[in-house]
Image: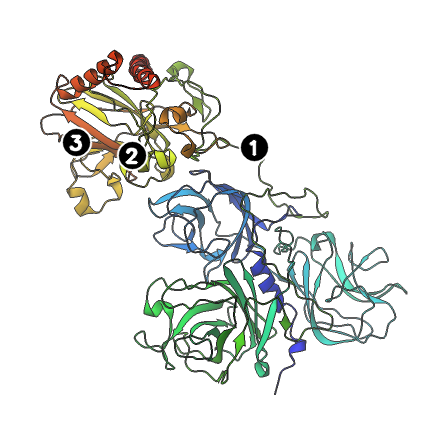
Amino acid sequence: MSLPLKDKPWLLLFGLLAALCSLQSHCQAAYPYYGTKIGSLTRLHHGVSGDVYAVDSRTIFIKKFNYDGEAPAAYFYVGSTGKPSNEGGLRLRDERGGTASLTRRYRNKDVTLSLPEGKTLRDIKWFSVWCDEFAVNFGDVSIPSNLDFPRPQKINGLRGVHGVSSDNIVIVDAQTLLVPNFSYDGQAPDAKFWVGRGQRPTPEGLRIPDENGKENPLRRYDRKTIVLTLPEDLTIFDIGHFGVWCEAFTVDFGHVSLPADLNVPPSLKMLGISPQSKLNCEVLYDDLAFEVRWAVAGESIVVQLVAKLEPNNYMSFGISPNKNISQMIGADAVVAWVDPETGNGFAQDYYLDGKAQCSGGRGACPDTKIAEKTNSIRLLNAAMVNGYSIVTYQRSLAATDRLDLPISVNEPESVVWAIGPLNDYREVSFHSFYNKHLHQIEFGRQPKWNCPLPEGAKSSGNSAEDEDDAPQQQSSTGGAGYPPAGRPSSAEPEEEFYDNRPQALHRTPQPPAPQKRQETAIITQRRPVPTPKPVNSDGAWDIPAIQCHEPEDGVFYAQMGPTGGKHGYPAITGHVGWGISWYINGLLIPELHVVRGKTYTFVVEGGNNPDIPAKYHPFYISDDPVGGYEHKREEEKKAVRIFAGVHRSRSGQVTPTGVGRLCNWTPDVEGPPADDYQSFGAYQRTLTLKCDAGEPGVISWTPDRNTPDTVYYHCFTHRYLGWKIHVHDSCDGDNAAAASERHEVRLAGAEPAPVNENYAAETIRHETKMASALLRLSRRAY
């Protein structure tokens, strides 16, 4: 018997609208309520910041998210391990549904993210922006085990006169009410849906539109499930009751009281999402009310499948490999279902190699059973309402791997669908129902609803793309009675932020005396540094090497700073940096020249808190050009010789000793990017040295005859932060002589060169000596 599609719950559209709207990040939020605040992202690296909220059991909302977009392999991650890591963590798709790394810049953007399939906030302990390339946490927030995340709440049903009744009402979110099986005889002249303050209806209340958005007197309803939306900025926090009220005769036909302090999700509107464009819908199989709804959003498509399924049954929908035939073999399909016991939803990417069950990667198989990392489907939400399974997912219009088929928006696509039971492995067993004839859909058509709707109802969604750098605004007002939402703090704490943007005003740093050391977190030092020559023709900045006779006392200051964009670390070394690198005596990864038999002192200010890996950079010297000794495999460690910066116990355990307070050469986030500077000198003069309170670390090193001619200074816990040290037998040889000869020739004018280069060379020599003198004097502070 065919089921009446027109009687299906209007809530079925809500999940699709929510999914579509989560793709839109250029919105204007109208309310200060975003759900339950989890906390603020720790500000560790690359400008990551933002306030994190739990919207519901599997949705995270980040208010005013910031990230400079400079890291090579940053992703959103969640996990249940003790601390953030990609080992055991789960990578999230971004707010657009993409799986690529975060390469674009976020500036005060509102971002909505969904947890992986089958996971809820109960299953995870942290959320992080994590760099896979260098295993670094850029910012995270802990998720309490007792987090009371928002969720739809059931209240009592309606009971009253004129046949008013309903099942238990569901408060879907702060502005949406689901009224299942609502009945009313339609006999009264002026009955309206009614809300107001207090526990009982009064004439001072407010009428709200019906499920069609109209405020006409209510018609007859016979066990109809409807969804009502509170108008404007009115929320369930502003009202104490809901019911049916006869406005002309001031009679209560039936009402329910709303409990105080309902912990429900914010509405789409509260998250700054305003559905505007219509959705598409097509009936696939009327007998089981099987429908497909969709909307194209940029380079992806959001699809919602709805069907009246038997327990343990699936519904599938996919693209045929033949545009002229609805062909199962070779099709790219999605298999979806909802577990009626847990309410968890599933959407799996399938490749239909054959009509049999999956076995050995042949047959109707999930893509991941054929090849790793081929699931191209992002589950957005799922629900079971009054026996209807509702699954919403997103995928790219393009084929993202060899098992996918692209979806055209310019011409019709032949599609396939099926319904049937799942086997014991939660995979397709066989199909009880399927399309036996050609079925084509124009996915790129103008929105058109070809499915039954309640009389007069309108569907709406949103496929607008966001503008990356558009300003985010929000109203500071809202309805009275909002629960505390945890507003972001207006105070901006200092942070380790490498955005490769210089500061407008130059302040020459100098080390403070110990008796004047402050207890505050940030101390600004003044210390002169050399001015390097303009950039080389290959694009790399020319960083002057520190020669074996400079500084005379052999003292080096090792601090952290930005990599300098495309002209800096990657161009100099040929390796990709992750945003920071060592600065020696104020220079970005200079090559050092040292002499065997002489003792050198490194004043290390790379961080001393191992609990914050992004701010913990022990300095050490070895024959390994990569660095990151701590995280190497045992066989790799055996091949590395360490010359300074560690202590080796009798048992062979290696502990870093080159640790001290953290000092950063810090750019101005509002300045131009480092790529705009043609020389490191111009860029370096705009940096400001900021230091945490505390003591620096000091290590000594005397290279000897067993020291190789080339060694490297690096970070003990991270790869690719340092560069080369050249070891010489004496300082009277070719190295010093050649440097002196080149300088004298230039001063004599024998080598044609612009005046500014001669001036720069002289300045480098003079300022290097000044820096050495000041650094030598500053040693007394340590």
Q: Residue at x 16, y 23 (%)?
A: 702
Q: Secondary structure at mark 2?
A: helix
Query: Residue 90: image x %, image y %?
Result: 40, 55
Residue 71: name its quadrant. top left
Q: Which residue is mark 2?
A: 572
Confirm whether residue 552 shows in the render: no
Sequence-earlier tag: 2 or 1? 1
**In the depicted view, which residue is nearer to us: 771 or 143?**
771
Q: How many marks?
A: 3
User: What residue is shown with label 1?
Assistant: 491
Query: Residue 388 at x, y = what percent?
Result: 58, 74
Front-most of residues 745 and 354: 745
* Circle 3: element type: strand
Out of 119 and 102, give the one closest to the viewer.
102
Tell me if I can see residue 256 in this picture: yes
Residue 710 is tagged as 3
395 relative position to 698: left or right: right
Residue mark closest to the camera, 2 vs 1: 2
Quadrant placement of the C terminus: top left
Task: Give the foreground label among 1 and 3.
Answer: 3
Please report whichever mark, 1 or 3, sits nearer to the chain's N-terminal start.
1
Q: Secondary structure at mark 1?
A: loop
Looking at the picture, which amino acid does disc 1 mark? Ala
- x, y percentage for residue 501? 45, 32
The colour mode here is rainbow
- Quarter-of-image position of residue 590: top left
